[in-house]
Every structure is written in structure tokens, then in C-alpha cells.
């Protein structure tokens, strides 16, 4: 199967991460004979500066014609780019795994959780107003939005440790979080084989530090998910390791969880793992959707090659290593070739 992949390199460290990720993708493409057409599209802070628009129409057109998108971080224009893309393409599930990896400074070696974040409503809907000296933001929670994200979380849990925790703050936000919690409770009845419980978001923030190994799938609303997934990334070693997928019915965008880190941009020291693992998630999604074993193998090889590189002590400075972004990408590609010969 030929896949059209839109590539948004983004701003800050995005272009460097993209280049290292492309090195690894080219290797897996060559080894497995994958048929990929990578179509470059512009968006983000630099695009705003150069073209006056953070998300030009031609980029949206490229996304419409692609099977999936791989995206680097964009910077201050996140609301005009990724938040907008999620709404335009109804990418309702933001899937953010956090897993302890060998050689990475995780709080514990046995953390393996996923934050499933509702991605189209909540406080990120963008309904903000000024009235005199006040600024007002509306939080939108719908039954439909809550049902579909809850169902996504339970389906995912069936393939994992069969445990879902709905995170909310229904004791204070009685109507919005109340509806979310009630809906998750209702959907949980469709999945008797999955254990279900609820946790207030403040307790979840604490428990992610205290006992992160106890979590499997966290399902939560948009902004809580954004915050808790950064925390979960730090629990397993840092944002440089954190991939994500923005998933809809027929299209998906895969990107690092983090921002574009302008302080280290252009120095060739950024960790590309977050973007390489995002590419792995992309191949997994494409493979599952299309029943394509090659794409599923590509996903596995990318993840295994990253893991093996870290196990061998090969890493960028954020993890205490001395590799540049470029050399790390090159070494992961070499390891990927090695692993593929053995399997
Ligand atoms: N810490 C900066 C950061 O995470 N930037 C990316 C960002 O804000 N993305 C918006 C989102 O995921 O909703």
C-alpha cells in the first residue's frame, strides 16, 4: 500500500527532530520496501512570520489528501495550528503513552501508562471573550464527546492491562466534569472485563508521582490531559521521550507532546526520540487501519531500535548522553538495520 504522509517540520527544534526522524524512516522504508510519499507542508511560527498565516490553506489541502501527518512542534502558534487541525479534522482522541525505557531516567522502571485526552472540546474549544475588565473562557463538555473518548479508552484498555481511570474534578465543576464522569461510568458498563475507577485531577497529579506504576489508561478532558501527559512524560524521563497521536475516524496527526524549545533550537542537541516514537505510532495506526503487516513491522522496528539505542547508552544531552540530534538518528537507523536482520 502506498501511503501519502504529510510532514510538517514545524519551528524551533522541529526541523532538527524531523531530519533525524526521516533518517530512521528512510532506513525502515528501504529494509521493508514500504511505499511512502512524503509531502512537505508548512505551519507554525516561522510560517506565520514568512507567509502571514500559521496554517495556510495549501497545508490544510495537503492534509486532506494524505493518509496521515507527521508533525514537529510549532511554538507559540499551537492554538492556530494543532488545536485548529484537531477541530478541522475531528481528531477527537489524543493518545499520549508514557513508558519507562532502559537507560532513561524514569522515576521507576515499571511505568507503562497512556493518557487518553479528549481533544476537541473542554477549555481548548477556543471560546474566550473579554467583557470590560474580565476575560471569560467557556468549557464545553458534551455527552457525545465524552462517550466517544470513553469508548476509545476502554477499547485501548482491552489491548493492555484492562484498567481505566477517569480523571475529572466533578466535586467542583459539577456540570461539566459531572457530565464527563457520568458518561464514563455509563460506558464502563459496556466493558465488564475492564476495571474502572475515578480520580480527581489533583489526586491524579499526586499519584502520578507517588505510584505511577498503578496506572494503565487515564481518560480525561482536554486541558487536564494536556497537563497530566507532560507530568507523565517527566515521570518516565522527560518530554524528549514523549510521542503522541491525534486520532480521528479516517485521519490522524502524530507529533511530539512538547513545544518547540526555542532555547535549544539550532544547536543539534534536541532529543528526536519523541518524534521517532510518534512515527512509530503513525505506522501502528496505518497498519491496524489497513491490515498492513509491513506498516505494523515498521512501527515495531522503530520502537525497538530506539529502545535498544537507549539500552546501549546512546542518547542526547537531555538524558545525560553526548549524541547530537543527527548522530542519534543515524545510530538508531543502524540499530534498526541490525535488529531487522535478526527478526
Ligand atoms: N510546553 C509547551 C507545549 O507543550 N507546547 C505544545 C502545545 O502547547 N500544544 C498544545 C496542545 O497539545 O494542546
Image (spheres, helix red, strand yellow):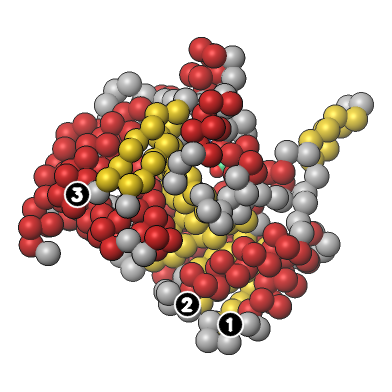
46 lies above or below 154: above
Q: Please name whichever residue, 151 or 137, is drawn nearer the observer in this view of the structure.
A: 151
Where does label 3 land, which residue?
A: 33
Can residue 43 be seen in the rendering of this structure?
A: yes
What residue lies at 49% left-to-right and 73% top-to-bottom? 157
Can residue 328 be seen in the rendering of this structure?
A: no
Residue 117, how many percent across, how many down?
Answer: 58, 56
For disc 1, the neighbor class at 10 Å (few under 14, some 14 to 19, many from 20) is some
Where does label 1 land, which residue?
A: 191
Residue 160 placement: quadrant: bottom left
Circles 1 and 3: CB atoms closer than 8 Å? no
Whichever of callouts 1 and 3 sits on the residue coming sooner in the sequence is 3
Residue 146 shown left or right of residue 99 in the figure = right
Where does label 2 land, which residue?
A: 158
Residue 306 shown left or right of residue 40 in the figure = left
Q: Please name whichever residue, 340 or 104, is drawn nearer the observer in this view of the structure.
A: 340
What residue lies at 40% left-to-right and 60% top-to-bottom? 290
For disc 3, the neighbor class at 10 Å (few under 14, some 14 to 19, many from 20) is few
8 lies above or below 226: above
Mark 1 or 3: the one toward you: 3
Q: Please name whichever residue, 51 or 179, is drawn nearer the observer in this view of the structure.
A: 51
- For the residues labelled 1 and 2, the Cα–Cα distance comes to 9 Å
Whichever of callouts 1 and 2 sits on the residue coming sooner in the sequence is 2
Label 3 within 8 A of ligand 1 by Cβ: no
Amino acid at each position: 500500500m502506498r501511503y501519502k504522509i504529510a510532514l510538517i517540520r514545524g519551528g524551533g527544534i522541529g526541523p532538527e527532530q524531523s531530519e533525524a526522524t526521516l533518517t530512521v524512516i528512510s532506513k525502515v522504508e528501504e529494509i521493508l520496501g514500504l511505499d511512502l510519499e512524503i509531502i512537505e507542508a508548512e505551519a507554525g511560527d516561522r510560517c506565520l512570520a514568512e507567509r502571514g498565516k500559521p496554517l495556510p490553506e495549501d497545508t490544510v489541502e495537503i492534509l486532506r489528501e494524505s493518509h496521515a501527518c507527521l508533525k514537529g512542534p510549532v511554538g507559540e502558534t499551537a492554538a492556530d495550528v494543532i488545536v485548529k487541525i484537531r477541530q478541522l479534522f475531528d481528531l477527537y482522541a489524543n493518545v499520549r503513552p508514557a513508558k519507562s525505557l532502559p537507560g532513561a531516567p524514569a522515576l521507576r522502571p515499571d511505568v507503562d501508562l497512556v493518557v487518553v485526552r479528549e481533544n476537541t472540546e473542554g477549555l481548548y474549544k477556543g471560546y474566550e471573550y473579554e467583557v470590560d475588565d474580565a476575560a471569560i473562557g467557556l468549557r464545553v463538555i458534551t455527552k457525545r464527546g465524552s462517550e466517544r473518548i470513553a469508548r476509545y479508552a476502554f477499547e485501548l484498555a482491552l489491548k493492555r492491562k484492562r484498567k481505566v481511570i477517569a480523571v475529572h474534578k466533578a466535586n467542583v465543576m459539577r456540570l461539566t466534569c459531572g457530565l464527563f464522569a457520568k458518561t464514563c461510568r455509563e460506558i464502563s458498563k459496556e466493558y465488564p472485563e475492564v476495571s474502572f475507577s475515578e480520580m480527581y485531577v489533583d489526586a491524579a497529579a499526586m499519584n502520578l508521582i507517588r505510584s505511577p506504576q498503578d496506572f494503565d489508561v487515564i481518560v480525561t478532558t482536554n486541558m487536564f490531559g494536556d497537563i497530566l501527559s507532560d507530568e507523565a512524560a517527566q515521570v518516565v524521563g522527560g518530554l524528549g521521550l514523549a510521542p503522541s497521536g491525534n486520532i480521528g475516524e479516517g485521519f490522524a496527526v502524530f507529533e511530539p507532546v512538547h513545544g518547540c524549545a526555542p532555547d535549544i533550537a539550532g544547536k543539534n542537541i534536541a532529543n528526536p526520540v519523541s518524534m521517532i516514537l510518534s512515527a512509530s505510532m503513525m505506522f501502528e495506526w496505518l497498519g491496524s487501519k489497513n491490515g498492513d503487516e509491513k506498516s505494523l513491522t515498521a512501527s515495531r522496528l522503530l520502537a525497538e531500535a530506539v529502545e535498544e539505542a537507549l539500552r546501549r547508552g546512546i542518547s542526547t544531552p537531555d538524558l545525560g548522553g553526548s549524541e547530537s540530534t543527527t548522530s542519534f538518528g543515524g545510530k538508531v537507523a543502524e540499530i534498526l538495520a541490525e535488529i531487522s536482520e535478526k527478526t
